[in-house]
Amino acid sequence: MLGQCITKNESLIAWVKEMTNLCQPTNVHWCDGSDEEYQSFCDLMVKSGTFTKLNENKRPNSYLARSHPSDVARVEDRTFICSKTKEEAGPNNNWADPDKMKAEMLPLYKGCMRGRTLYVIPFCMGPLGSPIAKIGIEITDSLYVVANMRIMTRMGKSVIEALGEKGTFIQCLHSVGAPLEPGQQDVPWPCEPDPAKKYIVHFPDDPAVWSYGSGYGGNALLGKKCIALRIASNVARKEGWMAEHMLILALTNPAGKTYYITAAFPSACGKTNLAMMMPTLPGWKVRCLGDDIAWIRRGDDGRLYAMNPENGFFGVAPGTSMQSNPNAMHSMEKNTIFTNVVLTPDGDVWWEDMGVPAPEKGIDWHGNEWTPSSGTKGAHPNARFTAPASQCPVIDKDWENPAGVPISAILFGGRRPSTIPLVNQSFSWEHGVFMGSAAGSETTAAALGASGQLRRDPFAMLPFCGYNMGDYFGYWLTFAKENRNALPKIFFVNWFRKTADGRWLWPGYGENSRVLKWICERVEGTGKAQETPIGYLPTPDAIDLSDCKVSAEDMAELLKVDKEGWIKEIESIGQNYARYGAHLPAALTAQLDELKARLNK
Ligand code: OXD
Ligand code: MN
């Protein structure tokens, strides 16, 4: 019944037994993470119709999956943090009493894997052997999840070895919630189609994650958002480090000096593009260490060090092209899983804004015949590619360094068509925390709900902070208590400014290297800046615009302090702050008041 057990860890064996009794699968499979196993899983999924194998000559060892139309993105309204009290979870999270939630969910899990195999996935977030890596065990009945977890995490036997007989692990229970009755035909993407019956639930005090009903992305690949952000943010606060929704990049200047930069942008705002960008400025080089999550700890020298806990990229496909992100395109040339993109007649993939003509006809993400004149999108806007990070042509040599890399600058940003300048440096750590707390963006397709509306997304962590966001602000502020001068400089960037008639003011992509250059100069204390009410803005000549087509007028617009816009901004930030009540640190209210006073001077 227990399958080919590969561990002597008694608490793991006991938990798998208990879950097997609860979920009543037909088989149990312990994943060893080997190539042969991965291959056999892919073959099984091709047979069952979950995977379509892509043309081996065009995209070796790569597959396409199409999800159920109800299961295409993270379900934030069905995501819960079950801390002891509602107050601990804060207004930023849905809360439920942990015992009550368990009582509500246990009947759902009872027999939920009938007719299916229960897979045990041992995984590690962070390089194996690193002192801050965390081991989790995900139990799932989805082979799609197993295959994605193999790319996104370090997974298999090596993790079981690292766990040993006595090691502890984070319990992650996942089911698509679609038991098979005897003789019942399976479907390519089993899930619970009723949105109200999906659950993504975190128990920070155990810690554990229970996920039910969805097989998609962050709802189901539990190492990513659930463990590496929501649970890790809780653990980090207790242990004195930070779990952040940030990319990590290394930027080397023509003189050969390297700066490590982390950046927090909300979902689908270009973190993957910036993380592996090709600078247009001659002599500058970007290397990628991570595109979504950074675990940050303080080194003995007082500096902050960032490490990527993931092993792959789960990137948004639409909009990714040889123009916007050639390194991502190369990362997914082989060994990649595509979800919800178009299948072309020659057995390859296509999506909107891929930079190549659409196929005359193809199969869209629903599995229907599709042509460019169908009037619908061929790929879902949140279609994804899952690719090994090691395949990125500009992966940094230190991306698996367990110690992480020392950060020189932290960037916050979002999609803000107006008011927010191209780049703005904070006056201090506290002012930088204020900037992070005030971050916002137009919503995107990464989560279910309307796109294109301004949503305050402090630190790009609104959907991912596993405790009261007011306390999270306070925790960030504590880092300045010691070694203030060793802390990274903080900047706010906005690549997404538009004119009133909808024209982009800034070309973005590789041209963002011009802004990064100024940021490095500010780190060195050489970049030219003017002190304004909102922060240090570049002087008109400070950003290197050699061979760049941005006009002086557009540059002036990108760098101006829009007083009226900021007055509205202050009001909106204040309204958002009010949500956090007594948990909002006084230092941030003071920052808001000071900003107001500076603007009105
Ligand atoms: C992601 C997200 O998938 O933020 O990274 O939604
Ligand atoms: Mn993300």
Image: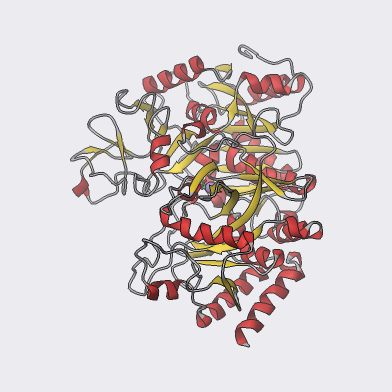
Query: Which coloring applies here?
Result: secondary structure
**Closest to the observer, 597 or 452:** 597
Q: Quadrant of the C terminus?
A: bottom right
Above or below, comparing residue 188 to residue 589 in the picture: above
Give the residue at x 55% y 38%.
Answer: 396
x and y, in percent, of residue 480 in the image = 77, 60
Position in image of residue 157 (x %, y %): 63, 18
481 vs 17, left or right, is right
What residue is shown at x 30% (from left), y 28% (from top)?
Answer: 58
The one nearer the camera, 395 or 118, is: 395
Q: Quadrant of the N terminus?
A: top right
> Residue 543 versus residue 67: which sits nearer the camera?
543
Residue 71 visible, this angle: no
Q: Considering only vertical position in the picture, is 33 above or below 256?
A: above
Q: Is residue 460 visible?
A: yes
In the image as oriented, which residue stretches furthest toward the front?
255
Count of marks placed on residues: 0
Image position, residue 150 (x, y; %): 53, 27
Task: Examine the image and state in which quarter residue 484 appears.
Answer: bottom right
Q: Is residue 18 left or right of residue 65?
A: right
**Which of the 4 image quarters holds residue 434?**
bottom right
